[in-house]
């Protein structure tokens, strides 16, 4: 289905608005007087600091910047952070890439490489790590192993999301939007209270029809249908004590992901569906996911030098996704995955500050129970013929009449169902400390470490019935011919205990009041994996990372420019990779041996004038499995989803039109070089660059605004992933990236902002 005609007028309108702004932007650039650049404050080191004074690579975006740039998803956030790439096949299946290393393991026993934190709590479990980005105070992204600060899941970095907190003065805001592909959005928040109790309620509801037409008659593909809300309460009995209680609810009922054959890419239609049966749990392709969590944070300022903080959290998720993995109209590879889990965590931390000594000590406990249930449904004759198993009987590949031919017309279809499930019960106890000492007025040394003790239990069960067609031919086998372990529904389990000490060492040297140099050495670890899918306990050893980093941060006051530059080298042992088993289609973890990662990153923030802000970032990364014979078949290969070069340029602009109105505009251009979609380096995509623009008008007091937005303005054709589950069965599939989309939003706010 071609939508270009429907988009002609909005694109023209947006172009006119941008064109009208160009002369004004040029005039502002020519001005000599620069706007004072607001200092960026972050809390990555568990205390409020200027971002320039933090001796590690960190990027931060505040809530207003997120709104101005239209960032409301993880993948759009990645455009603003050097060395960060976020891939989202669906809300259930996300890949986070920091410095070329991907974290996307969805299995229950698997461990994350990137910590995703929400209000100080680890929410990194893959199938529940994504949530709606709305009503944020700020987002911080930290690079390199950060076990001391964010736990073992931060073996390559961390993304920390801090939601907006309640305030005393009343304020309320509502945004409504509409756009092409049936886009609808309602977002809002209300806050207020008194000196002792303040409350806040924020919500977002957004929908968009799929941009790939599903000719099977079901819902169009690659759309979304989301609802999220967040009530929060702040209690301040006195000036020294603050209690924050936050509940998050996140619901997604998205249509299916468009896994399509390569010859169907960018044709705007596909025929994908799944049969209605019990094993899949859904009667159509799509996602039904619910995530709920509760966070309690208690902060007590004991005196001017000591502060005690407790963070307790509970999280529950249930994510069901059904997908047509063969990418064709054939009912060959119908899968579903249901990921469920419960998590509980506690952290107690004592911060101390003095004239020369600052830092913290603490302890934490984390416990989770998780399961990944994978259902499979097919038609026996079609599956066997597509697998080439019926060639000896003279039946060609993917013959839809295979069952009729083999049964002599007694049956036209023989449905087949099977499943496997893996589970995990993980517990970890952590002790951590981080101490910064001001050696001289210009030199600060930091030493930190985390001791972690883990207990990891894994389980596996499966049920693969005998094939009726094969049994009729005298072959007592399931459709996979015994290549997939069949426990006949019985659960087998195994366990492993592990402990480690993960330190970090930092030096920060002030060249002057505006320029800092820093050096870092840190160790990281991705937890070992207990794999039971072969029927015996198999331990994939922990992935170990050593990180060396040197950086420069500073501010040019005379031109209101903040800059940061970092060079890093990372050495990996027991590098864990996820691969699709070419016999069974299962995703398993393998040890690929040693790997190295070298790169450079740059981040700029320039207040060109009172009306114009420019943001720029770039990264170059040379990474891959070491080209060593001991590393087997992956030796010399580039990492999955790892671009060699990424970069982005963004702007924020506003200018008075008259005494009552302001013209507003923002935009971003992002670039990434070619990537491979698998560790085998078989599926590759060329470089992609995308342009997003926003333009509108607002009241001079910002109490209302009207904004027209375009994503992928130039309608660039690109893919998000390739290969996928279908590749193991000879059906490699591709996922198309979003085309140009347009929307119009109106916002109204009242109260104290």
Image (spheres, grey):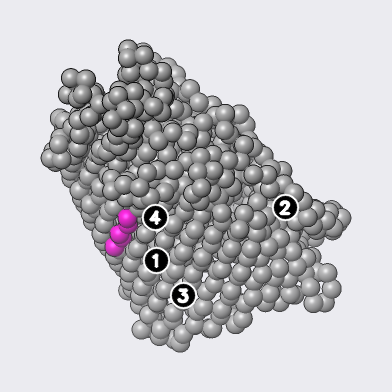
The location of residue 739, given as percent across then percent down, is 63, 45
Disc 2 from disc 4: Cα separation: 30 Å
Q: Which of marks 1 and 2 is in front?
A: 2
Q: Nearer the viewer, mark 1 or mark 4?
A: 4
- In the image, which residues are magenta? 314-318
N-terminal of the two: label 3 or label 1?
3
Query: Which element is circle 1 on?
Result: strand
Q: Which of 753 and 520 is in front in this view?
A: 753
Disc 3 from disc 2: Cα separation: 36 Å
Left or right: residue 471 versus residue 331 is: left
Q: Would you call the spot at circle 4 few (<14 residues within 10 Å), some (14-19), or many (20 or more)? A: some
Quadrant the N terminus occupies: top right
The location of residue 243, given as percent across then percent down, is 35, 75
Q: Would you call the spot at circle 3 few (<14 residues within 10 Å), some (14-19), or many (20 or more)? A: many
Disc 1 from disc 2: Cα separation: 37 Å
**Residue at left offset 65%, top offset 59%:** 179
Q: Are marks 3 and 1 in contact (CB under 8 Å)?
A: no
Q: Secondary structure of the magenta portion, mostly?
A: strand
The location of residue 471, given as percent across then percent down, is 19, 25
N-terminal of the two: label 3 or label 2?
2
Residue 169 badge: none
Residue 477 appears anywhere in the view: yes
**Residue at left offset 71%, top offset 77%:** 701
Q: Which residue corresponds to mark 4?
A: 288
Q: Which residue corresponds to mark 3?
A: 201
The location of residue 363, given as percent across then percent down, is 25, 57
Splitting the image into 4 quarters, where does residue 66 fall?
bottom right
Left or right: residue 594 versus residue 372 is: right
Query: Which element is circle 2 on?
Result: helix
Splitting the image into 4 quarters, where does residue 198 fall?
bottom left
Q: Which residue corresponds to mark 2?
A: 6
N-terminal of the two: label 1 or label 2?
2
């Amino acid at each position: 289905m071609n939508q270009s005609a429907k988009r002609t007028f909005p694109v023209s309108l947006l172009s006119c608005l941008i064109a009208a702004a160009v002369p004004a932007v040029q005039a502002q650039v020519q001005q000599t007087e620069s706007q004072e650049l607001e200092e960026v404050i972050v809390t990555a080191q568990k205390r409020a600091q200027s971002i320039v004074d933090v001796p590690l690579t960190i990027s931060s975006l505040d809530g207003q910047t997120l709104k101005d740039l239209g960032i409301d998803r993880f993948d759009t956030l990645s455009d603003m952070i050097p060395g960060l790439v976020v891939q989202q096949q669906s809300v259930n299946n996300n890949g986070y890439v920091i410095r070329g290393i991907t974290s996307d393991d969805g299995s229950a026993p698997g461990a994350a490489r990137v910590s995703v934190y929400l209000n100080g709590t680890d929410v990194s479990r893959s199938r529940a790590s994504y949530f709606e980005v709305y009503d944020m105070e700020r987002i911080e992204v930290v690079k390199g192993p950060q076990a001391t600060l964010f736990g073992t899941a931060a073996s390559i970095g961390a993304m920390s999301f801090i939601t907006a907190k309640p305030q005393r003065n009343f304020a309320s805001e509502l945004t409504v939007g509409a756009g092409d592909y049936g886009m609808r959005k309602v977002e809002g928040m209300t806050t207020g209270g008194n000196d002792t109790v303040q409350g806040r309620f924020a919500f977002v509801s957004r929908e968009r029809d799929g941009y790939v037409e599903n000719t099977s008659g079901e819902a169009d593909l690659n759309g979304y249908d989301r609802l999220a809300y967040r009530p929060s309460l702040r209690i301040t009995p006195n000036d020294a004590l603050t209690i924050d209680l936050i509940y998050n609810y996140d619901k997604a009922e998205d249509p299916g992901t468009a896994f399509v054959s390569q010859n169907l890419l960018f044709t705007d239609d596909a025929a994908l569906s799944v049969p209605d049966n019990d094993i899949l749990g859904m009667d159509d392709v799509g996602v039904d996911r619910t995530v709920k969590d509760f966070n309690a944070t208690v902060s007590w300022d004991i005196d001017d030098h000591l502060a005690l903080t407790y963070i307790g959290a509970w999280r529950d998720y249930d994510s069901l996704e059904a997908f047509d993995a063969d990418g064709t109209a054939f009912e060959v590879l119908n899968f579903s995955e249901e990921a469920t889990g419960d998590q509980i965590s506690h952290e107690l931390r004592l911060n101390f500050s003095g004239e020369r000594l600052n830092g913290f000590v603490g302890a934490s406990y984390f416990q989770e129970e998780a399961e990944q249930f994978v259902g499979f449904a097919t038609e026996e004759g079609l599956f066997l013929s597509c697998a080439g198993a019926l060639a000896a009987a003279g039946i060609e590949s993917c013959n839809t009449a295979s069952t009729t031919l083999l049964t002599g017309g007694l049956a036209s279809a023989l449905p087949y169902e099977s499943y496997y499930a893996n589970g995990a019960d993980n517990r970890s106890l952590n002790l951590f400390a981080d101490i910064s000492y001001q050696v001289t007025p210009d030199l600060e040394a930091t030493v930190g470490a985390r001791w972690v003790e883990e207990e990891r239990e894994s389980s596996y069960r499966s049920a693969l019935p005998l094939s009726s067609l094969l049994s009729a031919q005298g072959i007592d086998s399931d459709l996979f011919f015994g290549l997939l372990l069949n426990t006949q529904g019985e659960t087998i389990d195994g366990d492993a205990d592990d402990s480690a000490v993960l330190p970090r060492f930092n030096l920060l040297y002030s060249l002057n009041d505006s320029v800092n140099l820093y050096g870092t050495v840190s160790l990281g670890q991705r937890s070992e994996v207990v794999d039971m899918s072969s029927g015996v306990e198999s331990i994939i050893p922990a992935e170990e990372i050593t990180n060396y980093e040197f950086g420069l941060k500073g501010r040019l006051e005379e031109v209101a420019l903040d800059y940061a530059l970092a060079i890093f080298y990372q050495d990996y042992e027991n590098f864990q990779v996820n691969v699709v088993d070419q016999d069974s289609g299962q995703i398993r973890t393998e040890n690929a041996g040693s790997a190295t990662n070298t790169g450079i990153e740059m981040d700029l923030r320039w207040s060109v004038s009172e009306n114009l802000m420019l943001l720029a970032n770039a990264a170059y990364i040379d990474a891959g499995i070491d080209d060593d014979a001991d590393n087997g078949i992956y030796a010399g290969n580039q990492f999955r989803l790892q671009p060699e070069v990424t970069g982005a340029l963004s702007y924020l602009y506003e200018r008075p039109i008259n005494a009552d109105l302001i013209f507003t505009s923002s935009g971003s251009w992002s670039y990434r070089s070619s990537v491979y979609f698998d560790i085998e380096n078989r599926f590759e995509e060329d470089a992609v660059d995308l342009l997003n623009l926003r333009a509108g008008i607002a009241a001079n007091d910002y109490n209302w605004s009207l904004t027209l937005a375009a994503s992928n303005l130039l309608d660039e054709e690109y893919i998000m992933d390739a290969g996928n589950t279908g590749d193991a069965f000879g059906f490699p599939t591709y996922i198309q990236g979003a085309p140009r989309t347009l929307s119009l939003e109106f916002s109204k706010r009242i109260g104290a902002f």
